[in-house]
Image: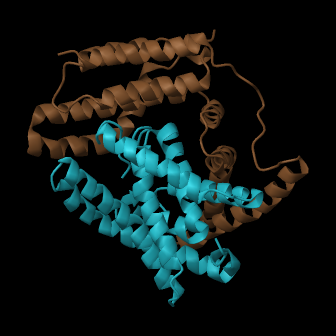
C-alpha cells in the first residue's frame, strides 16, 4: 500500500518539508513552547509515510555532533533554555529531512529539483553523482583489496603517499570512465540535458497538503 | 563541519541560499556535454573518497578534498561542491536543506581560493598543492567560526577552528600526494583551461 505522502508529487514533498523546516528554524532561541506543537505535528506528518521511527531517530542523530557543540557554546553565552531550543530545532529539522529522504527515492528528489527550476548544470552533476557514486565506491574497495593482498607490512610512514596514489588512481579511472560514458551517452542521443522519463502533475491535493502542513507548523510556532 | 538546520538564523540562510544558487548558475553556465560528464565523475570520485575514513594516530579522519576540487575543476568546483553537499545532506543528514547555501558558500570559497592559488605560477607543484589542500579546509573552518561569532555563539568556534589546523595539514599532505601522482601519470588533467 502506498501512503499519502509517497503519492504526492516530489515537488510537493520537498516544499512541504522545506516549509516545515523553515518554520521550525524561525523559532526564536529561548522559546520552548512551540516544540510542544512541533513534536506531535512531526509525528503526524511521519504517519502519512512508511518511514520506521528507529530509522528517523538514528538519522536525526547524525547532526548531533554539530548541534550539541553549538548548543554547548550557547549555554555559556545565553543560558540553558536558548541552548535547548537550538538543539531541539536542529534535531527536529534533521528528523523531517530524514523522513523526506526515506519516503522519496533519490531519483524522485532529483526529478523534483529539476522541475523546481534548479540550474541545469547542478541537475546534470547530481544526475551523474546519482549514477556513479556507488560504482566508484566499489571501485575504490577493489583498489584497497588489491593493495591489502599485495602488502605484508603496515603502511607506516609512507601511508600518505600510498593513500595519495590510491585516491589519484580512482580519479584517473573516473576520468577515463567519463570519456567512455560520454561517448555512450552521445550514441544514445544525449543533447546536454536529461530526458524527462515521466510527467507528473502538481494537483490540488499536493497544494492542499503543502499549505495544510505549513499552516499547522506556523500555528504551533505561536504557542506560548 | 556541516552546519545543521536551525542553528543559524533564517535570514542568514536565505541570503546564503540566494548567493549560492546565483554562484551555481553563474559558475556552471555554458557547460559542454563532455565537461558535464567529467565533472559528474569527478564529483562522484571525490565524494566517494570523502566517505572513506582512514586510521591516523589512534583515531580516524576523512577528507573534504575542497582544495583538490578547486585544482581539478577550477571555477566549476563551486557547482560540484554544491551538488556534493546536497547529496550529503539528503543521504546522510550531514548539514541540512536550509543551511545548504551557507555550507556551500563556506566550502565553495575554500575551493575557489584553492583554484586561484593553483593558477599562481609557483614551483615546486607539490608544495603549491599542499597550500591548496590546506587552504581548502582551513578557510571554510575560519568562515564558520566567524559566522558563529557574529551570530552570538561567542568565540568558542574560533578556538575550535584552531583544531582544524591538524586536519588542514593532513588534507594538504594528501592533496600534494594526489597531485604528485596525477602529475606523473596524467599531467594534462592538472593544467586544463577552465
The type of colouring in the image is: by chain
Residue B156 shown left or right of residue A19 in the figure: left
User: Where, quadrant-wise, is the N terminus of chain A in this rendering?
Assistant: top right
Quadrant of the rendered structure where residue A57 is? top left
Identify whether B104 is placed above or below A153: above
The residue drawn where x is 32% and y is 59% is B143
Chain ID, brown in image: A
Q: Depth check: give the residue in front, A58 or A216.
A: A216
Quadrant of the rendered structure where residue A92 is? top left
Residue A185, can we see it? yes
Identify whether A170 is placed above or below A64: below
Q: Colour of chain B?
A: cyan
Q: Depth check: give the residue in front, B30 or B82.
A: B30
The residue drawn where x is 17% and y is 36% is A83
User: Where, quadrant-wise, is the C terminus of chain A in this rendering?
Assistant: top left
List x then y, in percent, for residue A53.
Answer: 43, 20
The residue drawn where x is 46% and y is 84% is B127
Quadrant of the rendered structure where residue A8 is? top right
List x then y, in percent, for residue A220.
Answer: 29, 15
Residue A136 shown left or right of residue B63 in the figure: right
List x then y, in percent, for residue B33.
Answer: 76, 56
Q: Depth check: give the residue in front, B45 or A25.
A: A25
Identify whether B3 is placed above or below B160: above
List x then y, in percent, for residue B16.
Answer: 40, 48
Residue A37 shown left or right of residue B38 in the figure: left
Residue A188 shown left or right of residue A56 in the figure: right
The furthest residue to the bottom: B123
Residue A151, can we see it? no
Amino acid at each position: 500500500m502506498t501512503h499519502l505522502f509517497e503519492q504526492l508529487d516530489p515537488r510537493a514533498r520537498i516544499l512541504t518539508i522545506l516549509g516545515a523546516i523553515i518554520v521550525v528554524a524561525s523559532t526564536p532561541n529561548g522559546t520552548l513552547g512551540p516544540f510542544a506543537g512541533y513534536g506531535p505535528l512531526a509525528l503526524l506528518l511521519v504517519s502519512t509515510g512508511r518511514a520506521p521511527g528507529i530509522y528517523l531517530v538514528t538519522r536525526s542523530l547524525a547532526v548531533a555532533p554539530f548541534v550539541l557543540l553549538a548548543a554547548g557554546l550557547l549555554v555559556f553565552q545565553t543560558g540553558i533554555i536558548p541552548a535547548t531550543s537550538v538543539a531541539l530545532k536542529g534535531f527536529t529539522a534533521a528528523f523531517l529531512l530524514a523522513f523526506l529522504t526515506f519516503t522519496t527515492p533519490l531519483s524522485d528528489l532529483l526529478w523534483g529539483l529539476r522541475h523546481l527550476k534548479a540550474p541545469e548544470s547542478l541537475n546534470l552533476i547530481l544526475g551523474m553523482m546519482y549514477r556513479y557514486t556507488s560504482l566508484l565506491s566499489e571501485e575504490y574497495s577493489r583498489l584497497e583489496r588489491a593493495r591489502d593482498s599485495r602488502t605484508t607490512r603496515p603502511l607506516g610512514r609512507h601511508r600518505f603517499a600510498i593513500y595519495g596514489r590510491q585516491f589519484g588512481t580512482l580519479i584517473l579511472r573516473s576520468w577515463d570512465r567519463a570519456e567512455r560514458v560520454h561517448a555512450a551517452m552521445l550514441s544514445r542521443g544525449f543533447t546536454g540535458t536529461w530526458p524527462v522519463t515521466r510527467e507528473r502533475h502538481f494537483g490540488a491535493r499536493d497544494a492542499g497538503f503543502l499549505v495544510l502542513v505549513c499552516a499547522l507548523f506556523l500555528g504551533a510556532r505561536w504557542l506560548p | 563541519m556541516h552546519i545543521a538546520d536551525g542553528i543559524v538564523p533564517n535570514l542568514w540562510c536565505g541570503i546564503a541560499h540566494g548567493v549560492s544558487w546565483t554562484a551555481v548558475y553563474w559558475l556552471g553556465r555554458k557547460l559542454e556535454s563532455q565537461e558535464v560528464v567529467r565533472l559528474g565523475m569527478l564529483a562522484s570520485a571525490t565524494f566517494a573518497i570523502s566517505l572513506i575514513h582512514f586510521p591516523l594516530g589512534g583515531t580516524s579522519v576523512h577528507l573534504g578534498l575542497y582544495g583538490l576540487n578547486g585544482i581539478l575543476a577550477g571555477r566549476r568546483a563551486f557547482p560540484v561542491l554544491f551538488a556534493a553537499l546536497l547529496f550529503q545532506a539528503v543521504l546522510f543528514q550531514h548539514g541540512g536543506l536550509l543551511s545548504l547555501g551557507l555550507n556551500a558558500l563556506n566550502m565553495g570559497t575554500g575551493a575557489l581560493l584553492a583554484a586561484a592559488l593553483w593558477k599562481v605560477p609557483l614551483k615546486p607543484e607539490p608544495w603549491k598543492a599542499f597550500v591548496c589542500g590546506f587552504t581548502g579546509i582551513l578557510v571554510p573552518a575560519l568562515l564558520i567560526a566567524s559566522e558563529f561569532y557574529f551570530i552570538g555563539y561567542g568565540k568558542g568556534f574560533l578556538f575550535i577552528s584552531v583544531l582544524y589546523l591538524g586536519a588542514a595539514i593532513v588534507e594538504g599532505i594528501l592533496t600534494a600526494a594526489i597531485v604528485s601522482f596525477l602529475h606523473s601519470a596524467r599531467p594534462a588533467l592538472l593544467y586544463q583551461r577552465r
